[in-house]
Amino acid sequence: MTTPLLTVENLTLNYRTGGDPVQALRGVSLTARAGEVLGIVGESGCGKSTLAATLMGLAGTNAEITDGAVSFRGENILTAREETRRKLRGKHIAMVFQDPMTAFNPVLTIGAQLVDFQHNSGTPKRQRHSAARDMLDRVGIPDPDICMGRFPHELSGGMRQRAAIAAALLMQPEILIADEPTTALDVTMEAQIIHLLRNLQSDYDGAIIIVTHQLGVIAQLCDRVVVMYAGQVVEEADVDTLFHAPRHPYTKALIACDPASLSIKEKRLPTIGGRPPDLAHPPAGCAFADRCAQVEPICRTAAPPRVEIGPDHIAKCHEAWS
């Protein structure tokens, strides 16, 4: 692996509300390297999408970053001017959003929007049209010339998601962020999108960040995995280590809940009891303590340390060595 393209250091973000601020991200640190696929996994509400939106500068007007840095090629983009960040979006860092139905303007054709997405390229319109058509073909859309003239509602969900991926890749960004790219699709379309992303990885020089709650997507696509819980990174490892030798109790519980991990048929799928803590009033100790089968008294009073289990494998847990 090469020098990181993107480095997140101790990123802390609060959402201002009518009451106490919600501490959505709490000291998040990670890296994304060229030529790899980084997975970010966790339950709904653990901060995955907030992190992705923050990397794009789209966290919302009520979001307040209180600490940390996000560096792209060594420059902190959190402190950059909005004009600079606007130029980064699309050209250097692009995003595929969760819902393919809302990814496009419904009153413009797919072709018109793909051509417009390249407005910062400085190339003639005819050349941009040709690039858009070629990218639709690359992501596996049949009859790309016909697709160029269609409106978003005339495409199936899977085709819209392919078109959204094409739009994100048009400017050849160095980092592609895919936020739950298969959640809104049926299992057949999900398999096709996973296959597409896997093929893109083979000839893509940049970094791909996959945000998902689906462990199957992580297992099929990713090189490294970051596990998030209650706005924090609780474990990070390469994909094989994470699935075969997880050390954080939350990671173990997530894997145990994956239907693919069951060796026998069960009438009920396993679940993690309880619910994540209220991040307007996060606990003093480990955020997972109330749901953890390995909880010890220290877990409720002291924040867990960052334990280096091995090369590129860390876990934040008092019991990580056991």
Image (spheres, rainbow, N blue to C red):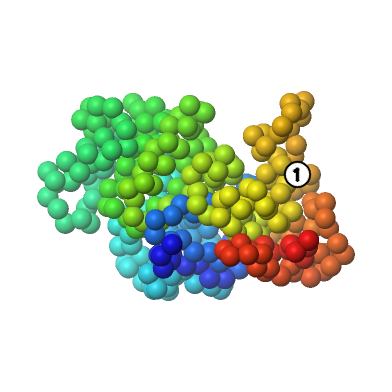
Q: What residue is drawn where x is 71% and y is 56%?
A: 248
Q: Is residue 87 visible?
A: yes
- In this figure, what is the number of numbered marks? 1
Q: Quadrant of residue 152?
A: top left
**Can you say whether 273 is above or below 94 in the image?**
above
Task: List the single residue furthest toward the right.
Answer: 297
Q: Is residue 4 left or right of residue 84?
A: right
Amino acid type assigned to the residue bearing label 1 in the image: Ile
Quarter of the picture holding the C terminus: bottom right
Indicate the quadrant where residue 15 lies. bottom right
Q: Position of residue 172 (x, y in %)?
A: 29, 53
From the top left corner, tell me how far across and down residue 131 is, in percent.
Answer: 20, 43
Q: Decide if residue 284 is in sight here.
A: no
From this view, report whether residue 261 is shown above or below residue 116: above
Please state the horizontal and vertical placement of residue 307, each as a whole percent of the image: 68, 68
Crowd class of label 1 (few under 14; some 14 to 19; many from 20; radius 10 Å): few
Closer to the camera, 156 or 102? 156
Say which residue appears at 52% left-offset and 28% top-offset: 187
Q: Residue at x 39, y 38 (%)?
A: 196
Q: Is residue 230 left or right of residue 214?
A: right
Q: Residue at x 28, y 27 (%)?
A: 142
**Picture layout, residue 142 above or below residue 26:** above
Dot 1 lies on which element? loop
Q: Position of residue 146 (x, y in %)?
A: 23, 27
Left or right: where 112 falls relative to 163? left
Residue receiving disc 1: 272
Task: Name the image quarter holding the N terminus.
Answer: bottom left
